[in-house]
Image (tube, grey):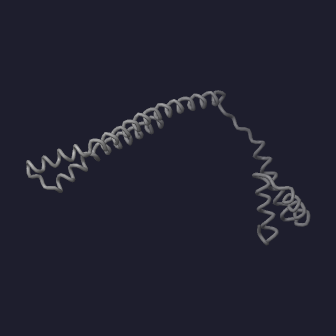
Amino acid sequence: MSENPHARAQQLLMQAVVEGLQPAEEAWLREHQASCAECAREAAAAQDAVRALKSVTVMAPRDLAARTQLRMRLRAEDLTRSASGSLWLWGIAGASWVLGLVSAPLVWQVFSWAGQNYGVPKLALQVGFVLWWTVPALVAAGVVLYQRMLSRGNRGA
């Protein structure tokens, strides 16, 4: 740990109060406190503080547990509804990707035909083709973000 025995004793003392010590560390700390009055006083003060904290009574409303259980049930139902909505969204998104991949050659032929017959520049056709696939995805992402915003607003109410 530390080369300074007082610093080590202080660290072990804090560890003893919070999480406990290994037997070897506990023996070292007792031995050090027996030979060091300052560390022994710190240990006594820490024990007094712990005893004082344990003696404090906190009054909680009688129905606190029931209210907490109700809120937990409501939150679990909210998460379940949210998860089922997300499952549908993932399914629709997956179907959209599959249909997009299958129909891409046909859509490009339509764009190419429109470009040849109406003199649309190739760059405009390419931008239009990309937008044909990205706009629905952006709309879906907007819907998801909007739903999350609404669900966060409902939780805060």
Whether residue 134 sits left or right of residue 83 in the image: it is left
Give the image location of residue 56, x and y in percent. 75, 42
Residue 97 occupies which quadrant of the picture?
A: top left
Whether residue 78 sits left or right of residue 120 in the image: it is right
Give the image location of residue 64, x and y in percent. 63, 30
Give the image location of residue 109, x and y in percent. 19, 46
- Residue placed furthest toward the bottom: 3
In this rendering, the answer to whether 4 lies above or below 19 is below
Which residue is at the front of the view, 42 or 74?
A: 74
Image quarter in which the N terminus is found: bottom right
- Which residue is at a point 70% across and 38% down the rendered structure image? 58
Residue 55 occupies which quadrant of the picture?
A: top right
Give the image location of residue 127, x and y in percent. 21, 53
In this rendering, the answer to whether 110 lies above or below 42 is above
- Which residue is at a point 73% across and 38% down the rendered structure image? 57
In this rendering, the answer to whether 23 lies above or below 87 is below
Whether residue 109 sits left or right of residue 85 in the image: it is left
